[in-house]
Image (spheres, rainbow, N blue to C red):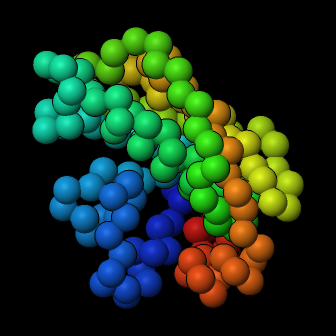
């Protein structure tokens, strides 16, 4: 596994407050990512303040986690940025906050010049599948990605 560098955190832009991945956002998820073969992976420790039912990680937070890792798969594997076009989530079992750290995985299933389909998984601390999603991303061309979305290029993530 090789850690993926977060070039946005090193950009010097004090406006970088992404809820999913900014280390500067005190109420954010502060995710970090690794390359593992053709997958992007992350480990994350749920916090009680993000529960829905007692001791259960809120489903909206689970969706955010899956969407965020899909975005990083697009940025590092498709070498551009995009926006979520659709997301189909299947919740399989509760994510108990008291169980501790969870794992996230994302794999690019299909990618073209305008669309990518990303398969994502959220695994409990015991390795069992808790939720999965198929995320469709509309991709921007490299010029638009750089000029309008500050995409630093694929090499910046190494």
Residue 97 coordinates in the image, percent (x, y): 22, 25
Q: Say if residue 118 shows up in the picture.
A: yes
Q: Residue at x 14, y 33 (%)?
A: 48
Relative to 96, say whether 114 is above or below.
below
Q: Residue furthest front?
A: 85
Q: Quadrant of residue 110?
A: top right
- Nearer to the camera, 86 or 66: 86
Q: How many marks?
A: 0
Q: Say if residue 38 shows up in the picture.
A: no
Residue 46 coordinates in the image, percent (x, y): 25, 35
Q: Residue furthest right?
A: 112
Relative to 100, say whether 40 is above or below.
below
Residue 147 coordinates in the image, percent (x, y): 63, 87
Q: Quadrant of residue 82?
A: bottom right
Q: Residue at x 19, y 30 (%)?
A: 51
Relative to 157, say whether 128 is above or below.
above
- Nearer to the camera, 81 or 138: 138
Report whether 50 appears left or right of 13: left
Q: Residue at x 41, y 80 (%)?
A: 10
Relative to 83, say whether 54 is above or below.
above
Residue 113 coordinates in the image, percent (x, y): 85, 61
Report whether 16 appears left or right of 98: right
Quadrant of image for the C terminus: bottom right
Report whether 59 appears left or right of 109: left
Q: Residue at x 59, y 31 (%)?
A: 88
């Amino acid at each position: 596994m090789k850690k993926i560098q977060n070039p946005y955190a090193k950009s010097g832009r004090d406006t970088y407050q992404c809820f999913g991945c900014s280390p500067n956002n005190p109420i954010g998820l502060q995710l970090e990512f690794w390359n593992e073969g053709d997958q992007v992976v992350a480990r994350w420790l749920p916090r009680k303040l993000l529960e829905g039912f007692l001791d259960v990680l809120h489903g909206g937070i689970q969706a955010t986690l899956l969407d965020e890792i899909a975005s990083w798969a697009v940025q590092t594997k498709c070498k551009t940025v995009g926006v979520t076009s659709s997301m189909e989530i299947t919740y399989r079992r509760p994510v108990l906050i008291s169980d501790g750290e969870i794992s996230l995985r994302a794999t690019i299933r299909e990618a073209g010049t305008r669309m990518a389909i990303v398969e994502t998984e959220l695994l409990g601390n015991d390795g069992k599948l808790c939720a999965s999603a198929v995320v469709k991303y509309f991709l921007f061309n490299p010029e638009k990605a750089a000029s309008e979305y500050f995409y630093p290029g694929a090499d910046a993530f190494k």
